[in-house]
């Protein structure tokens, strides 16, 4: 723990020295200036409004992507035809650049729900692929035993399938949380959705407020870290014994 703190303090010192050497507030500002900008930002109602609107949409998009990914992975596992139908869709979502989806959603729905749809699009294939892989690695002998004892599907899902899928979903969760937030906020920057973190970042760029830009960046890093830790904590509570 002490080692990590020293490393972080070392990088902060390098950052401060870099800001002094550059001596240009537009190109680079020091950590104290960023903290000062953050202090003024958190006192504004607009800051908390932006935080609420951005995170509420991203959380909704993330959970929708998770649920759809798990349900459709289960359907694909049960019915190979469904898997064949969904395969090109999943490959398409994985291969097409996020910016293309941003433009399409802007044209079709505007910028109000942009971060919601983008986070859903990013999260869905991760959960679908990981869940399906976990299901395919289910212990065949356990399934045979369940069939012999005529164990009901719900009980099999809880006792056998969940144990098999759990590490794969945990891995998907670790990957998806950060990606959902980064992609959602990037979409807001491009789409210029009002009262959002993305709009705050864009405004700081327009006015060359590097201290505010870095303050918003710090906020994004913090909420991304907290979001991931909270979800992982909740999910680990459900870990099969």
Image: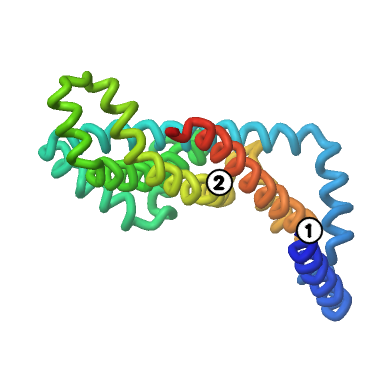
The residue at the point 33 percent across, 54 percent down is 94
Taking depth in this image into account, of 237 and 186 the one nearest to the observer is 237
Taking depth in this image into account, of 5 and 23 the one nearest to the observer is 5
Does 56 sit above or below residue 104?
above
The residue at the point 61 percent across, 42 percent down is 229
Residue pointed to by mark 1: 209
Residue 237: x and y in percent read: 53, 32
Residue 178 seen: yes
The quarter holding residue 131 reads top left
Which comes sooner in the sequence, label 1 or label 2?
2
Nearest to viewer (mark 1 / mark 2): 2
Residue 222: x and y in percent read: 69, 48
Report, in whole angstroms, how far the alpha carbon at label 1 lies from the one at label 2: 22 Å
- Crowd class of label 1 (few under 14; some 14 to 19; many from 20; radius 10 Å): some
Question: Which residue reaches farthest left?
Answer: 81
- Secondary-structure class at tag 1: loop
């Amino acid at each position: 723990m002490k080692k990590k703190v020293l490393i972080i303090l070392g990088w902060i010192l390098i950052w401060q020295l870099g800001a002094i050497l550059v001596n240009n507030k537009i190109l680079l500002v020091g950590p104290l200036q960023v903290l000062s900008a953050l202090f003024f930002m958190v006192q504004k109602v607009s800051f908390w409004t932006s935080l609420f609107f951005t995170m509420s949409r991203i959380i909704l998009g993330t959970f929708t992507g998770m649920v759809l990914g798990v349900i459709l992975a289960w359907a694909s596992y049960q019915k190979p035809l469904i898997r064949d139908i969904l395969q090109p869709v999943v490959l398409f979502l994985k291969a097409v650049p996020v910016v293309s989806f941003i433009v399409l959603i802007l044209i079709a729905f505007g910028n109000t729900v942009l971060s919601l749809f983008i986070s859903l699009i990013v999260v869905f294939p991760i959960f679908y692929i990981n869940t399906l892989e976990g299901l395919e690695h289910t212990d065949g002998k356990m399934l045979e035993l369940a069939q012999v004892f005529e164990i009901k599907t719900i009980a099999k899902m809880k006792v056998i399938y969940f144990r098999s899928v759990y590490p794969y979903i945990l891995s998907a969760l670790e990957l998806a949380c950060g990606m959902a937030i980064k992609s959602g906020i990037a979409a807001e920057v491009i789409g210029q959705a009002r009262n959002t973190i993305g709009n705050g970042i864009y405004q700081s760029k327009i006015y060359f407020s590097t201290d505010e830009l870095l303050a918003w960046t710090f906020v994004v890093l913090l909420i991304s870290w907290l979001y991931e830790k909270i979800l992982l904590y909740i999910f680990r509570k459900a870990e099969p014994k």
